[in-house]
Image (tube, rainbow, N blue to C red):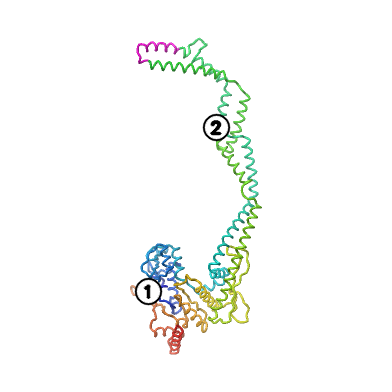
Amino acid sequence: MLRLLRIENFALVDQLELEFGPGLNVLTGETGAGKSIILDAIDGVLGGKITSRLLRTGSDRGLVEGTFLLSPPLKAWLDAQEIDLIDADSLICSREFSATQGSLRSRSRINGVLVNRQQVGQLREHLVEITAQGQTAQLMIASHQRDLLDAYGGEGVQQAKLVVAQTFTAYRQAQQALQARRQSEKDRLQRIDWLQYQHQELAGADLHDPQELSQLEQERDRLSHVVELQQMGYQTYQALYQNDQGGEAIADLLGPVEAQIKEMASYDSQLEGLLEMVQSALTQIVEAGQVLSRYSDSLESDPERLAEVETRLTTLRQLCRKYGPDLADVIAHGEAIATELANLTSGGQSIEALEAQARECYQTLTKACEQLRHQRQQAAQKLAKQVVKELKPLAMEKVQFDCRLLPLEPTAHGADQVVFYISPNPGEPLQPLSETASGGEMSRFLLALKACFSQIEAQNAGKTLIFDEIDAGVSGKVAQAIALKLHHLSRPHQILCVTHQPLIAALADHHFRVDKQVEKAKHNTPRTVVRVVPLTHPDSRTTELAQLTGGDSAQEAIAFAQSLLHQAAHQRR
């Protein structure tokens, strides 16, 4: 329940505090007096849109703040959000807004704690529900009628609807997979042909060792220089070990050196280390000469092998240019091709399997839609009876109403088009609500729906229901019926109602008059401001009702207003 509303620099309001009470709270005033500004402020404090035009001219900041009576669900929500209580029975929600460089910025707080838009939206669901005459236009929309029925159906419909949404998602995914497979089949076959060509080329090359190219290059160099290698090997052998040309080899020169150092070491042991070095060098030179001799003897010219190596080198270099840059990359590319070929030829589902899966998903979806339809049919029957029950006291005693389900192709919302049918007049056939109801009938229908929902939604306990000119376009007996309906709704709920009907205003538990005044501001500049006055004295209420009745306070209007107040007091009792 909304206990206190505080407004600063909002539209035409400079400073305003309003204390609301339980039951039916009514706001009256001339057309254009600013009643909607009060509702806009309530909407704004709970996350509604605030634009720069709502910041009072000449001000750089504004504030809207609402103090609400705490309820157990609200306390549980605050605990879940880790927001501390200010006191044991109140919650304060505020929104500051300011103009900055041509744009409007705002910040919301709950009990002084900064919160985001999502948190405010969650809180709003616990606090208020605003119903305006403009919402009757939404009643014309089939999807909105479906949503209303689903909300009325409660947990059973919501669970069935969730199953439909899940199965529809699975069916859509299966359809998309099938369509994608069909569309890509040609590309897939072309890709397979290209990969098979590459695979055959690489498989025919029999690639295994990433070092094969460098090894073959070395072998090619050796085979193409056999004669030079033999000559250089023989010459080096002679220089190291045995010179047949009459000169001395290195081994021959080191022999005497070894003998001389050996003799020197016999006189000075310090030279034994040097002796070992010379002896080791002589041994290595002899071994190197022998190795060179064997190497030179093993060299043979092999033109056939050289041709094979050249051919293999040409093949490997071509593959490197196509799939490289080096042989390791070529081998890796071949492995990747083999994997992709396996996936394209044996992995994944065939078109036939995907078609079967799509059919199975569609069957599951249709069964889920049938279950949802069953739940909706039960809710529709119950809603039809209750709407008629709520409409009859609203001067529609002979009304007929039906909530019909028309078949559709399955969607995420089911396979039903929900259409409200109504016959306000006896003897007339049922017609779609969007085609037959007048403005006044639509207003009453909207109020009846609100009454239906207020009875089934336990979470509405303690919620403030706001009605903005729900009585527009009605008068007389119909206005009286709407007044009584609002009065009954205000027993379990707090009601805030903007009205022009004296019959409704007379039943108010708390009555407020809204009007515009021109006051002098700074420098004696006239400014328009909105003022709200609680009408607590019987005379002030009588005068206001008389104004609503006849536009003045003539004696007849005063008498009529007094009778309205007397009748309202009797009805409240």
Q: In which quarter of the view is residue 33 placed?
A: bottom left
Residues packed near mark 2 inside 10 Å, few (<14), some (14 to 19) or many (20 plus): few
Which residue is farthest right? 352
Vertical order, 143 against 288 (above or below) = below
- Which amino acid is tagged 2? Gln
Instruction: Give the SS element for disc 1.
Output: strand
Quadrant, the N terminus:
bottom left
Which residue is farthest top? 246
x, y percentage for residue 38?
A: 42, 73
Q: In which quarter of the view is residue 342 placed?
A: top right
Contact (Cβ within 8 Å) of mark 2 with mark 1: no
Picture residue at 61% right of the left edge, 46% below the top = 343
Quadrant, the C terminus:
bottom left
Question: Mainly helix, strand or loop, the magenta region?
Answer: helix
Instruction: Give the SS element for disc 2.
Output: loop
x, y percentage for residue 383?
A: 56, 73
Which label lies toward us, 2 or 1? 2
To which residue does mark 2 refer?
A: 211
Segment tinted magenta in the rendering: 253-271
In the displayed structure, does residue 554 sit left or right of residue 134?
left
Q: How many marks?
A: 2
Mark 2 or mark 1: name the one nearer the start of the chain: 1
Picture residue at 37% right of the left edge, 75% below the top = 526
Residue 559 belongs to magenta span: no
x, y percentage for residue 218?
A: 55, 27
To which residue does mark 1 refer?
A: 17
x, y percentage for residue 406?
A: 62, 69
Which residue is farthest left? 523
- Which amino acid is tagged 1? Glu
Front residue of this view, candidates 232 and 181: 181
Residue 263 belongs to magenta span: yes
